[in-house]
Amino acid sequence: MEGYRRLLETNERWVAERLGERPDFFTRLTGTQDPDFVWIGCADSRVPAETVTGCAPGELFVHRNVANQVVHTDLNMLTVVFYAVEQLRVRHVIVCGHYGCGGVKAAMSGQDFGLINRWLQNIKDCAERHQEELGRLPREEDRLRRLVELNVLEQVDHLAKMSVIQRAWKMEGRPWLHGWVYDMDTGRLSELVLRTATDLPHPVHRFDIPE
């Protein structure tokens, strides 16, 4: 059997199981969506957002890219966050990295990856800013794990610098910003940071939001 056909057949079984549990499983989702959570995660196939969180369809609004980046020139990411915050009115935005991230490892390798270098530059910049801390760690594995965490922390900070986030903070006190990391060895999620409407960025990054 061709590999892709397995996916189609598995889908048929999944549909039958869901309908057996609840006949309106699909029709109840077709009219609108009302998720509480945005997930900005890594594109790595080993970290499926709904699977590791146990969420059902309709619960997560998902954006994924290499190494879970929040880049202010990424129109795709900006559109996802803007729509989720302004239109879906989500209450939580989660940036989730994972140990063993290939993007982080590639950024630290010094290897030339061509066009990909432009994306990895954001992680390299993060490593440079934290070189003193990373340099104190004796093992490369430890440095990579810590850079995964530092990268998550920086991406949450980037979210806090967005006007759409600050506007929602001022008007409604939402969303909460979460920085998580996933351990593929254990399957567990851990929270590294939580930022709310009281945790504004440096004044130079604050917008004058009218009442």
Image: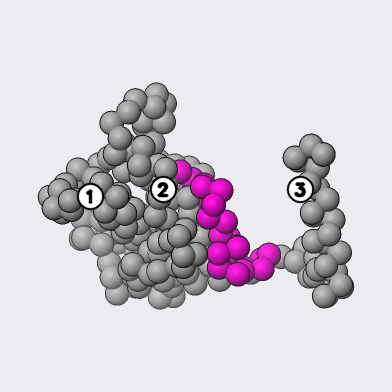
> Relative to 94, is 129 above or below?
above
Q: What's under tag 1, amino acid-wise?
A: Arg
Q: Quadrant of residue 182?
A: bottom left
**Front-most of residues 123 and 166:** 123
Check residue 101 in the rendering and tell me which mark sits there, or answer none: 2
Contact check, label 2 and label 1, Cβ < 8 Å: no
Quadrant where the C terminus is found in the figure: bottom left
Q: Position of residue 47 (x, y in %)?
A: 53, 55
Please name the residue that numbered disc 1 is placed on: 139
Check residue 7 in the rendering and tell me which mark sits there, or answer none: 3
Mark before the other along the chain sequence, 2 or 3: 3
- How far separated are the C-alphas under marks 2 and 3? 26 Å
Residue 106 can be seen in this image:
yes
> Relative to 110, is 150 above or below?
below
**Front-most of residues 147 and 91:** 147
Q: Residue at x 32, y 38 (%)?
A: 107
Mark before the other along the chain sequence, 3 or 1: 3
Q: Secondary structure at mark 2?
A: loop
Q: Position of residue 190 (x, y in %)?
A: 40, 69
Q: Quadrant of residue 156?
A: bottom left
Q: Position of residue 36 (x, y in %)?
A: 56, 71
Q: Residue at x 82, y 39 (%)?
A: 1
Q: What's under tag 3, amino acid-wise?
A: Leu
User: What color scheme is it?
Assistant: one colour
Label 1 environment density (alpha carbons within 10 Å; few <14, some 14–19, many ≥20): few
- Residues rendered magenta in the picture: 43-66
